[in-house]
Every structure is written in C-alpha cells, then in structure tokens.
Image: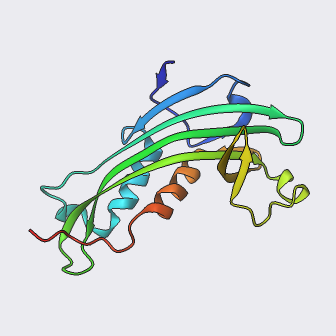
Amino acid sequence: MESRSSLKSTLALHEFPVDTPLSYSLNEKVDWPKALLEELNEEVGSSERNGFSSAISIRLEALRRRGQALGDYLLLEGEVWAKYITRCIMSFEIMEEILTIPMNAVVIPRIRQRSMGLEEATIFFVDDRERDLFFYDLKVDVAEIVHEYIYLNKNPYPKKSSP
C-alpha cells in the first residue's frame, strides 16, 4: 500500500473511502506536525537550540468503517516518533528527549456519545480490539488526536542522564 506524505489536520469523514485503508507518513515538512514539534520544543528558546536537533515522524493508517450501531467511524493506527529539545528538571540544562508512541484509536460520531452512554468512556471495543476513543462532529481533527497522544505520553519530568 502506497504511503501518502500529506494529510490535512482536519477532515470530513467522507474524504476517506469506506473499507479502504489509507497510509500516511508525515514529518515536520507538513504544517501541523511542524506545529506539534514547535510546541514540544517551546521549553527552549530558538536561539538556545544550537547543536541540538529535533524531528517528528507520524505514521498512520486510516480506515473508515460503517456500522449499524456506530454509523460512520474512523480507525487510526500507527506510531508517533519525536525527538525534541527540552530542559532537565534537575539542572535546567538543555537536552534532547525522544518519544515513541503507538496509536490505536477509533473516532465515532459525537451524537453516539450520549445515546450509547459513552460520556465518561476513554476506551471502546470495536473491530475485535480495544481502542482509544475519540469523537467527531462535522470533521475529524487528526492533529488534535495526535496532540493528545503526545501530551499524554510526554515525560513531564525530563532528567538528563549522568555522564
């Protein structure tokens, strides 16, 4: 399956064909992953980043499904990898941190949230797997879903290794 190198941050579900998986391989050359990387790097001013590098890679497979109970829904599987610049909480020294995050999400219509009693749910079992649960109204905000994965998995207390 061919991997696409561009994906809008917000999409209407009808932009995905039903039952046809689409693969995406994104990096900081795409606007919204670039913005996510800039947000990860915000602890360190751009003038202080000399000698350090940062990058982001987002690999996604999107599959639109249609079910009687759920209506149209989207499965997102893949991985987010990021190397970003931050500060050690102990020494305040600049350091690089690496994140590798598997993604396994289902995005269902928000109208089903209440009718199915999912107001407090974060996990949903669909297509024979437990998946992280997200909702959409008119559009699916892929960038926001990736953002949530990053910030739920980012180390809040980065600590530089002793030499």
Q: Residue at x 68, y 28 (%)?
A: 16
Q: Quadrant of residue 20?
A: top right
User: How many labels were placed on the picture?
Assistant: 0
Q: Residue at x 76, y 67 (%)?
A: 120
Q: Residue at x 80, y 53 (%)?
A: 110
For the residue pair 103 and 40, the one nearer the viewer reads as 103
Task: Name the spot of residue 85 as percent of width and height, x first.
Answer: 26, 61
For the residue pair 125 and 158, the one nearer the viewer reads as 125
Q: Is residue 123 above or below residue 86?
A: above
Residue at the extreme left = 163
Task: Name the spot of residue 38 as percent of width and height, x first.
Answer: 36, 56
Q: Is residue 119 above or below residue 68?
A: below
Task: Name the spot of residue 30 as percent of width and height, x first.
Answer: 42, 38
**Left or right: 102 with respect to 128?**
left
Q: Is residue 111 above or below residue 86?
A: above
Residue at the extreme front = 128
